[in-house]
Image (cartoon, grey):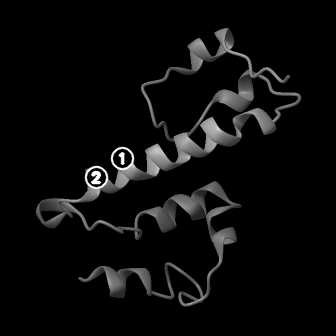
């Protein structure tokens, strides 16, 4: 099946032609169900060869934004529970999160 058809299945993505980032928030079970149908780089043996490059560019862009504008960003009332993620960009273990704190100027 093509990505075009998968991403426009109304059973998986209600109103597929509408830009709605809110569909990725809310009930965790529903979001996990929708993630099964999300395959922007395809899957299996026909996966996109450029996926690692695209992911590298995304990480570099986000890192550059934080580097340039990070001093303007402030975090208040951040605790250990805020540092536990469902998906990790780097090798990370929640137990080590207790050692880190986000500091503001």
Circle 2 — which element?
helix
Res 98 seen here: yes
Q: How far apart are marks 2 and 1 (CA)?
A: 5 Å
Instruction: Identify the residue shown where x is 62% and y is 81%.
Output: 19
Q: Name the residue carrying label 1.
A: 56
Instruction: Identify the residue shown where x is 27% and y is 57%.
Output: 51
Which one is nearer the viewer's eye here, 86 or 67? 67
Quarter assignment of residue 8: bottom left
Q: Position of residue 76 (x, y in %)?
A: 88, 30
- Vertical comparison of 104 with 13: above or below: above
Q: Position of residue 7 (x, y in %)?
A: 42, 80
Q: Name the residue carrying label 2.
A: 53
Circle 1 — which element?
helix
- Vertical comparison of 4 with 71: above or below: below
Which one is nearer the viewer's eye here, 58 or 19? 58
Quarter assignment of residue 45: bottom left
Which one is nearer the viewer's eye here, 94 or 61? 61
- Quadrant containing the N terminus in the rendered view: bottom left
- Quadrant containing the C terminus in the rendered view: top right
């Amino acid at each position: 099946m093509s990505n075009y058809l998968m991403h426009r299945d109304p059973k998986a993505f209600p109103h597929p032609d509408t830009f709605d980032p809110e569909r990725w928030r809310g009930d965790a079970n529903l979001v996990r169900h929708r993630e099964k149908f999300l395959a922007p780089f395809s899957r299996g043996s026909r996966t996109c060869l450029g996926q690692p490059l695209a992911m590298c560019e995304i990480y570099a862009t986000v890192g550059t934004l934080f580097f340039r504008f990070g001093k303007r960003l402030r975090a208040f009332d951040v605790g250990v529970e805020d540092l536990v993620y469902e998906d990790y960009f780097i090798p990370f273990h929640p137990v080590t999160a207790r050692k880190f704190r986000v500091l503001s100027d």
